[in-house]
């Protein structure tokens, strides 16, 4: 059966690349982002280039109504194939929690409201979507939940690193817990990736050396491969595998100083 893949933040950067790679595999897509123009442009490109079946949900995930509409789509679909209830949209079999943004200033310099919203988009929203997806995936005994975390989750890097660390820890536990039921849970942890992320947060990209930049194509290819292999944590590229291994043993003060790049 064709997978139906729901991707948050699917109009730009890493999320748009997930949409392209899943479309190229013949999957149906449910794209989520706030701006409806780019959503429709992305849907058109995916339909034209790969003949993909594409739904769009224009929703702000930090807004109760927007989140509720995405949760409703995750709860919809056939739970009992072959029965009279076998109607409606196909159930989501792959959830990609990807939408997110960064704050350029450190914790104490930001209004607390901004920090709370940042925590919500990176932790509360992916947990809520994973919870809804599990209600529908568990009865079917199959599914994949990918959360785009970051190598920042392995380093002292403010509340961004803390939020990503929470999702890495959750994915490790959930993969162990739901893996035996046929549900794979994976945190994909990229290093610096060329997307609109840094420009949107007003960060200085020039402080990051060229070799540390990754292409979204490689990140997503390796992320999907690791999720399909049932790995709880995916660190795309050999160079970032080495960096995250060293970060575990190097002094925190040194790792924190290096992690300040791209701010
Ligand atoms: N780029 C990097 O170096 C890097 C490295 C590690 C991890 N990551 C993570 O990768 C993920 C994707 O980032 P990216 O680099 O691809 O950034 P991006 O190019 O800025 O794309 C972000 C996407 O999220 C959507 N989005 C943002 N806020 C949203 C909201 N409140 N509700 C719904 N959609 C929202 C945006 O669309 P709208 O604005 O239209 O809503 C856009 O589609 C993030 O979780 C980020 O933390 C990025």
Image (spheres, grey):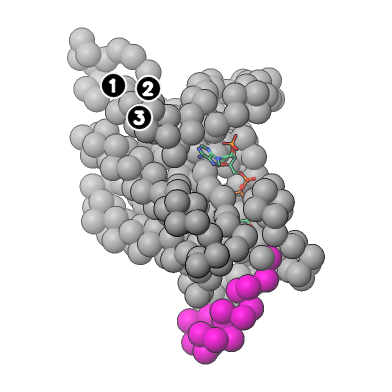
**For marks 2 and 3 on the same chain, the one whose residue lies earlier in the sequence:** 3
Provide residue 38's location: percent of width, then percent of height: 65, 28
Q: Residue at x 20, y 10 (%)?
A: 84
Q: Toward which corner of the image does residue 44 lie, by quadrant?
A: top right
**For marks 1 and 2 on the same chain, the one whose residue lies earlier in the sequence:** 1
Provide residue 178's location: percent of width, then percent of height: 25, 51
* Closer mark to the observer between disc 2 and disc 3: 3
Q: Secondary structure at mark 3?
A: helix
Q: Is the residue marked by circle 3 packed among few (<14), some (14-19), or many (20+) residues within 10 Å? A: some
**For marks 1 and 3 on the same chain, the one whose residue lies earlier in the sequence:** 3
Mark 2 → mark 3, Cα distance in angstroms: 18 Å
Provide residue 216's location: percent of width, then percent of height: 66, 50
Residue 147 seen from this side = no
Q: Nearer the viewer, residue 233 or 140?
A: 233
Mark 1 → mark 3, Cα distance in angstroms: 19 Å
Residue 37 appears left or right of 150? right
- Let me know if residue 67 is in the magenta part: no
Mark 1 → mark 2, Cα distance in angstroms: 6 Å
Q: Residue at x 51, y 74 (%)?
A: 155
Q: Give, as a single range, the part of the protein colored magenta.
A: 247-262
Q: Is the residue marked by circle 2 packed among few (<14), some (14-19), or many (20+) residues within 10 Å? A: some
* Closer mark to the observer between disc 1 and disc 3: 3
Q: Residue at x 49, y 52 (%)?
A: 114
As drawn, the label of residue 78 is: 1
Query: In the rendered view of the protein, which quadrant contains the C terminus?
Result: bottom right
Majority SS type along the magenta span: helix
Task: Say if mark 1 contacts mark 2, CB within 8 Å.
Answer: yes
Q: Nearer the viewer, residue 134 or 28?
A: 134
The residue to which callout 3 is attached is 68
Measured along the vertical axis of the image, is residue 32 above or below residue 260? above
């Amino acid at each position: 059966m064709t997978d139906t893949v729901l991707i948050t933040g699917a109009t730009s950067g890493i999320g748009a690349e997930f949409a392209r790679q899943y479309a190229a595999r013949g999957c149906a897509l449910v794209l989520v982002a706030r701006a409806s123009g780019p959503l429709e442009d992305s849907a058109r490109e995916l339909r034209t280039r790969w003949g993909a079946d594409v739904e769009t949900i224009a929703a702000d995930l930090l807004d109760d109504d927007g989140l509720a509409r995405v949760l409703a789509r995750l709860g919809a679909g056939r739970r009992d194939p072959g029965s009279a209830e076998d109607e409606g949209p196909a159930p989501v079999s792959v959830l990609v929690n990807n939408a997110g943004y960064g704050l350029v200033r450190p914790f104490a310099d930001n209004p607390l409201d901004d920090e709370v919203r940042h925590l919500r988009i990176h932790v509360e929203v992916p947990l809520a979507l994973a919870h809804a997806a599990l209600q529908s995936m568990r009865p079917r005994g199959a599914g994949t939940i990918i959360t785009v975390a970051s190598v920042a989750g392995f380093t002292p890097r403010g509340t961004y690193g803390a939020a990503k660390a929470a999702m890495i820890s959750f994915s490790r536990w959930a993969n162990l817990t739901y893996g035996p039921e046929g549900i794979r849970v994976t945190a994909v942890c990229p290093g610096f990736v060329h997307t609109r992320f840094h420009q949107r947060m007003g960060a200085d990209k020039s402080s990051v050396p060229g070799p540390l930049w990754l292409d979204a194509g490689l990140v997503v290819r390796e992320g999907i491969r690791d999720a399909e292999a049932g790995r709880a944590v995916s660190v795309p590229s050999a160079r970032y595998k080495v960096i995250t291994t060293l970060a575990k043993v190097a002094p925190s003060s040194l790792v924190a100083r290096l992690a300040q790049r791209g701010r």
